[in-house]
Image: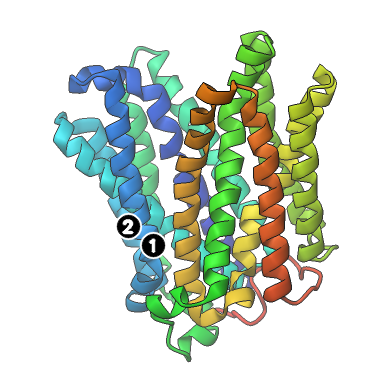
Amino acid sequence: MGNHKSFLVLICFVAFISLGLPDGLIGVAWPSLRVDYGVSLDSLGGLLISFTAGYLFASFNTGYIMSKMQLGTLLAFSCLVTGASLLGYAYSGVWVVLLAMAFFLGAGGGAIDASINTFAASNFSTSVVNWLHAFYGIGATLGPVIMTFYLVRDSSWALGYTTVAIVQLVLAFIFFLTLKWWKGANNKEEEVVAPAKPRETLSLTSTWLSILLFFVYTGTEISVGQWIFTILTKSRMLPDATAGFWTSVYWGSLTVGRIVFGFIMVRFSVHKVLTACLIGVVVGACLFAFNYSEFIVLAGIVIIGFTVAPVFPSLIAMTPDRIGDRHAGNAVGYQVSAAMIGGALLPGFAGLMIDYFGVEVISKIHIIEAAIILLIYWTISRLYPVPDKREKAPVLSSSSEPEI
């Protein structure tokens, strides 16, 4: 059984790599893709809107879907939809069809994201959930590499999408073969107690505080990454190469941080680690904003990236204890949806403020947002505390023994 446990963890890691792969393709492929489809450069906006709509639809309804469908079946079907959608990107040749494929690609990704996060929150240690999200970063990094590999060899961009589609379809086949394992691994209270209806979960104050927390946190994390380059080049006049490198350092610090904190949380309580990290985000944002020297600014970037790393996965892992197992499926779906919306709106809001206050206002906004995140987390922790204990060994929880 231990081997089956380890294999389920491994599948989840691979699934999150595959979840990140498509996200990194479009940026590299778009200049060539849009020529083949005969659309303008700004048509990317419509494609992203369609993708986001599908993602939100699936992630918001994942709790309900999981109450009607076994997890393994949902994952297999979602990967199948994702793979088929990627093939549609590559070979449909019709813009309207591509928009439809974007919706289904988003829906497949949203279902995979929310469902595996729900399963992981109930069955994995916080350490494993952190490592799970680190593997998403690996996938997002590999996507552009795959697409670039084909383009520099004068091959079609469609081959990049085909490659990732094959990965998704193979993963769908693996989920299909392991349906019994997924059913057996999910034998906690939710098999005895009926999952809550969406309106029940939405009636909880803790749900809405969690939604707000994920909205602000994810919006801030993405906003920092999106605006570092602009602030450094347009306001602080650093060379493009330096600014680009420092931006990469931010995302690299985040990925490394999730790996490192997976080990740290074996020794220290999750709540104390998160509190320290959120204070660290405020400190890092201040160092970056106040611009004392290039070294201090770089230190601020590294501190922000490293300390935001465990926040999202650890909050996901705490959801069943904080909101309850009956509500976990719905709540995780709402949190992932809120994260998607925050990641789209808050960076845009920061950009709008440039017209009124200049580029440097963005760094000040990030300080305010970091403080708000800390305040929301402090409030929800006081009102809805979870057991303040050290992490167990980073494997499936002992209460979720697969019945194989």
Q: For this view, does 164 lie left or right of residue 158?
A: right
- List x then y, in percent, for residue 262: 73, 55
Residue drawn at (30%, 53%) of the image: 80
Q: Is residue 245 above or below residue 250?
A: above
Instruction: Calculate the distance from the C-alpha at mark 2 to the C-alpha at mark 1.
Output: 6 Å
- Looking at the image, the residue that sits furthest to the bottom is 192
Is disc 2 in contact with disc 1, using a CB cutoff of under 8 Å?
Answer: yes
Picture quadrant of residue 132 = bottom right
Q: Amino acid at mark 1?
A: Phe
Which residue position holds label 2? 57
Q: Amino acid at mark 2?
A: Phe
Foreground: 268 or 383?
A: 383
Q: Is residue 96 above or below residue 244?
A: below
* Secondary structure of the residue carrying numbered label 2: helix
Quadrant containing the N terminus is: bottom right
- List x then y, in percent, for residue 52: 35, 45
Residue drawn at (74%, 36%) of the image: 285
Residue drawn at (58%, 19%) of the image: 230
Which residue position holds label 1? 60
Q: For this view, does 386 lie left or right of residue 148?
A: right
Q: Is residue 329 above or below residue 241?
A: below
Q: For this view, does 158 lie left or right of residue 322?
A: left
